[in-house]
Image: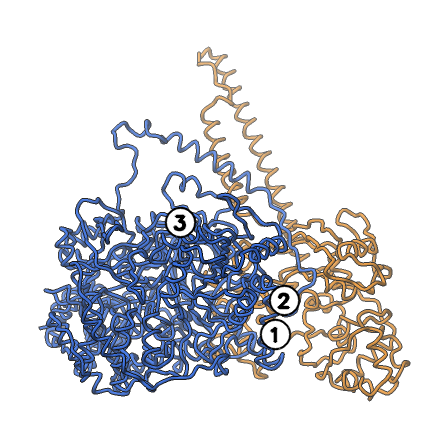
Amino acid sequence: MSDKKYWQSFAELNDKENFQKRSQDEFLEDLPFEDQDGKGWLDAKSPRRDFLKYLGFSTAAATIASCKQPVRKAIPYVNRPENVAPGVAKYYATTYVQSGDVLPIVAKVRDGRPIKIEGNDLCSYTKGGTSARVQASVLDLYDTNRLTHPKQKTGDKFQEVPTYEQLDKLVTSALSGLGGAPVVLLTGTIVSPSTQQVISEFLGKYPGSRHVQYDAMSYSGMLLANEASFGRRAIPSYRFDRAKVIVSLGADFLGTWLNPVEFGRAYSYNRKIDERNPQMSKHYQFESYLSLTGSNADERYSHRPSDTGAVALALYAALGGQVAAPSIADEKLRQGIQKAAADLKANSGAALVVCGSNDPNVQLVVNAINSAIGSNGSTIDWAQPLLVKQGIDKDMVDLVGQMNAGQVGALLVYDANPAYEYFDSAAFINGLKKVKLSVSFNEKMDETTLLCNYSVPTHHFLESWGDAEPKAGYISFMQPTIAPLFKTRPFQTSLLKWAGSNTDYETYFRQYWLGRLGGEQAFDKALQDGVLEGAAPATVTSGGASFNGSGIGNAVAQINANKKAGKDELVIYESVPLGSGKQGGNPWLLELHDPITKATWGNYAMISMTKAEELGIDYKSTDYEYYPEKPVIKITLNNKEVSLPALVIPGMNANTIAIAVGYGRNKELGVASFGIGQNVYPFARFNGTTVEHYAPVTVAGETFGKEKIAQVQIHNSYEGRTEVVKETTMATFKKYPKRYTEFREELAKEYAPKTGDFRKEATLYGDHVQPGLKWGMSIDMNSCIGCGACVVACHLENNVPIVGKKEVLRAHEMYWLRIDRYFVSDDQNPDDLKAVVFQPMLCQHCDNAPCENVCPVAATMHNSEGINQMAYNRCIGTRYCANNCPYKVRRFNWADYTGADSFKDNQKPLVEEGKLDEVVLQMNDDLTRMVLNPDVVVRSRGVMEKCSFCIQRTQEAKLKAKLENRVLVDGDAKTACMQACPTSAIIFGNANDQNSQVSQLRKNNPGRLFYVIEQIHTLPNVSYLAKVRNTDELQENVEEHAEAEHAGQNAEPGIPSEHKAEEKAAH
Amino acid sequence: MIFFKPNAKKIALTGIVFLLSFTAVLAQDGKQLFAANCQTCHSLTKDLTGPALAGVTERGPWGDRKNLHAWVHNPAAFMANNAYAKGLQAKFGSVMPSFPQLAEKDIDAIIDYVMTPPAQPTGGEATAGGQAAAEEEASNKNAIIFGIISIILALIALILMQVNSGLKKLSDDKENIVRPEPVPFYRNKVYIAMFALVLFVVGGYLVGKGAINLGRQKGYQPDQPIAFSHKVHAGVNQINCLYCHGNAWESKHAAIPSMNVCMNCHKAISTYEKGPKLYHPDGEEINGTNEIAKLYKYANYTAGQPWDASKAKPVEWVKIHNLPDHVFFSHAQHVNAGKVQCQTCHGNIQEMDVVKQQAELSMGWCINCHRETKVNFNDKADGSGNKFYSIYEKFHNDLKSGKMDSVTVKDIGGLECQKCHY
């Protein structure tokens, strides 16, 4: 009865046969043979004889060159620092801070260079979780586009200021010559208590000066609403772990909203299932586009962005609020609201409503809802307010007004880039011209720095001392993990100097904390741990959980007065990889696939299926999906317009177009981000109080040609095996808890009739034995939210190369670990998404691996610990293994992306020819290469690569245990993906140890345990736990399943035809 | 742990790998204990980091052995109540670390040793490595002899063939049979073909062999910026390898010691006097004192003055043992976990004035050792095996039942690619 279907692309959904046929082509494009004009090979640009000549010459030259042994030098320390052993990694606790995003981390430092970021386990609310952006931040340290010294602008050009003494003299004299005009310090949200004190000292020195905080994606609406409701301009802590029912009104709290790492962890806490008593939280999402959070929701409803207020009001009314709710036309949405309201009411005290709107009126209604369902004090914690976003839009708008009126004497900019991210950047740029003195402390030559008089770059956070207080009372410390690479200076030191103080920030910071902590010992301990929880907040603010609903009436009136304008609406959002765009030049993030669209390198317009049909986009054809060229649409708002290729995404609100911010950067920011995507910040609007992130627009299509989007989803085909993912509903799972177990039993019955031992009997090959360790991994698809932290962590740990957009377009991306995205819907109605399933896919380390049998040179083989090994030096690049891999996880290295060969810039000709992107050269730079992990070899062109189960880490863990003369314990060896995961979805360990986490997970979850396409007898060492959605939908198809089983009896042994059966069963 | 036996030959052979203070002391030889615990800071006859120890019992409170025991076990505590010991700290600038693990009888053994005049170290005999080298030399000689014989035989065959054709021509002339003028041998296609074939086979063999050896540098013995003699340090003075190369114990790199390690002793030792004469491989004699002077130049140190490490310049040593980047090799794994002696791979380094690469450091060489080397398995009655291996249930059963007599590195996966290549 259920028509459930898993699909990755529209073409697959609509024309499966044709699509699969096409996917079997080895190359997406025509091959560049030069014989096309029929002149014959000898007349080609490089004829065969020339080829042989070159071959002979280069062989001889290489031989002669390699005959001489180079003399290698070994230069030891003069005075080896205590506790530093060359070749042994050190770990230092520090903190990732970027425009209010704060995460306690531990930096792995090898021979003086930070090379990897790990979460800090001591932090009570992240427990070592990280995000993709945090993982990638170490590459920003070695960015070739960082500013290396202070500069002064003369005319149109920046010139170096040779010393900081000279700079200080220049700036202080300019500051004192302002003639009383105010000095304004414009920053992102400052979460550092010591920096706040530095700032107040600086401001004290210049009367009339002030500090303006400004967030690119603003949370002013919430701050103002909370001030009205609770008397506190702050954001409380949200306790998703205490919530049994979560309703999100457009808040992407798992992807980008406030502190997604914390929320992801807490959210997954109630999504892990105990099979003996299956229970999980229920998550409703009301949103306009398909966000990461929405795709994880149990029930999801879409509406126009401008209807958020109406939805909130309707929900409030359904909960018994005495308000006049606007009528909701959409029947499905209306029912959804009723259902959510009923659930909220039933779980009063364990329910939570969050809202992503930046309209204070909407947030006021949400506050009223939360107070009606008893969230305050239970799921909303006012004792530890979040301090990560403090910018008030009005302040910024006022500032720009004053700048334009010539009322600002000096503008000092730190950690903010209004020339790019401010909604009215033209006004800001105009105003900046009228400011006498402008100084930018930003690390790179971004759009704002370019316009300032002075550029005084600050340190990267890995080079800095500092502190951060993301939640009141939760302090996280920063200590330098490397000496400053360039002639940069902490911006706090600059402020102190310009305030006439002689101390630098390092001393200041030390004194500040020695004073607060009361002694060296406590200070050292705090630095060592990196986190200090339960500290007395520096500033105690009064007010709290008592809700004052007096403003509601007015808010309701304003929401109801809000008239829709225009047919279509554009919503600008932060993408999961790039966020607000602060790390916009980071190649790792640019190449990270967006969890929903699976697109890399650039932004695009997400449109609904209805809109696509309206615009005449034939998204159902195989060509649309197969070729990267997508039709460009033009979006216009008054005099602003943007043209971007359109991606059709199911589950979007019909009239909503969504575009990510953070793209369309200037050239000075680097080759990686230049020329990809468009900046859509100008589409934000100021409504008099706050900035709104949606706007009514007009959309035009058809006539604007096509542009390429580097999407990776269709690069790997499972040849129609749809049972790769397993997903069910709570109701079904409760009724048929053994469905997947039975499938396994059936397999054993059919293919191992004698012994019942599927592993041994159902194959012609012998069994591999693992006498000691057997590494295994368990991935809980219920916990996986698809955030991509593991993908970036894998890149860092294993020196996985960045290939650039052109190469991704040719399906040459190198991910060792990818996250596959599957849409789940009815056969008939793909737009009505039931769920989106994320499946991290990596080498399954099969015990009966199809790749091992086909390698002609035995470059890939099994080891005695259950790992499918890959010997790069033995590989000759036939790619047979990749062809034979049912999981499509092997990657062929097509170019020397990371500079493995000894010739400098050997990829330059390819870049000049336009075959490779310039970013490959950036990744080949000596500075960038400092990020490489010295324990993992850099692969060269022409070899196959794949996940190694982080063998360098398992080897290290084993060595450590041997050195300590003890048994390896669970948790000694963690793969990079496991360590990065904020929700502990990935668990790795010794499967031979019955007490290890991975064994326990497999043992305790028999009902959800599955191995991907296990019927083909690959015997993977990676197991998955099926995803369960918390809905009442019952999927009755067991009988059919059993029946279908018999249909496959004639199949060859070893290659059973269950996938057909399973496919049917899935329908 | 491997311990020195009171046997000069063995000492010379096994060298001096282990000194770390957690060594379970079994051997009672004072000299050995001295070498293992004291030598890094004390000489018998000269003040180094600590005072010269000869005649120690005749000074200060040390006449009473109880005082000595107390001092060695806890110098700081002893010093608190003893003016003489305080004077020592003033003189040497630091306090001796405590050695609580040394039993009183061990301390006595050390004192007995330092109070007797030192005996001259005896030299080692021809080593296994030497024998191997000799064998290889012999086989090389054989190859040359065989080669010469083959060439002579080939020449004889060629001459005979020429003679044969000449005779044939003569007889033909006699019988007036007209034959075409014979082709000279260098234009004879059969000869050329044969020659080409031989050239191809021999050339191919040599090229192949040469290519395999590309990047290998067995026997590499470059000149170093300072003629540092391992023989003097590790051989004659018995300094434990790990005193300088302590990094090998915990890290993948053995690491060349930093200059402060050199200066630890050489602040006091400024001349080379009593040891054996030093020779460069080409026979030239090396003046040890001059070499120490070179070190001082790098260190920017004037004898008798305090040393400021920040003004020193690092020595750019020439790296001898080099593994390609695609090989992961960990000294800690081999030296610390595997208890392999330095000499196994580096040869008798304690006899080398100038270090020479002894082993091929090729994959075959590694693999052979992994095939043969027994793992310190957790099956020893005395519990001395590594507990890590207790999880290998199957092997333990096989060892018990006698199916296996020992577990080699190969059995625990030592031949697998990704043990070293990742």
Residue drawn at x 41%, y 46% is: A918
Q: Is residue A968 above or below residue A611?
A: below
Q: Earlier in the sequence, mark 2 or mark 1?
A: 2
The reply, left or right, for residue A697 in relation to residue B109 is left
Residue A290, given in percent of the width and then of the height, sits at: 24, 65
The reply, left or right, for residue A137 in relation to residue A757 is right
Q: Element type at marker 1? A: helix
The three-letter code of the residue at mark 1 reads: Gln
Q: Colour of chain B?
A: orange
How much space separates mark 2 and mark 3, taking CA atoms?
36 Å
Marks 2 and 1: CB-CB under 8 Å?
yes
- In this orientation, which residue lies closer to the viewer: A934 or B313? B313
Residue A421, given in percent of the width and then of the height, sits at: 37, 58
Q: Element type at marker 2? A: loop
How much space separates mark 3 and mark 1, taking CA atoms?
40 Å
Q: For mark 2, name the chain.
A: A
Q: Is residue A956 above or below residue A435?
A: below
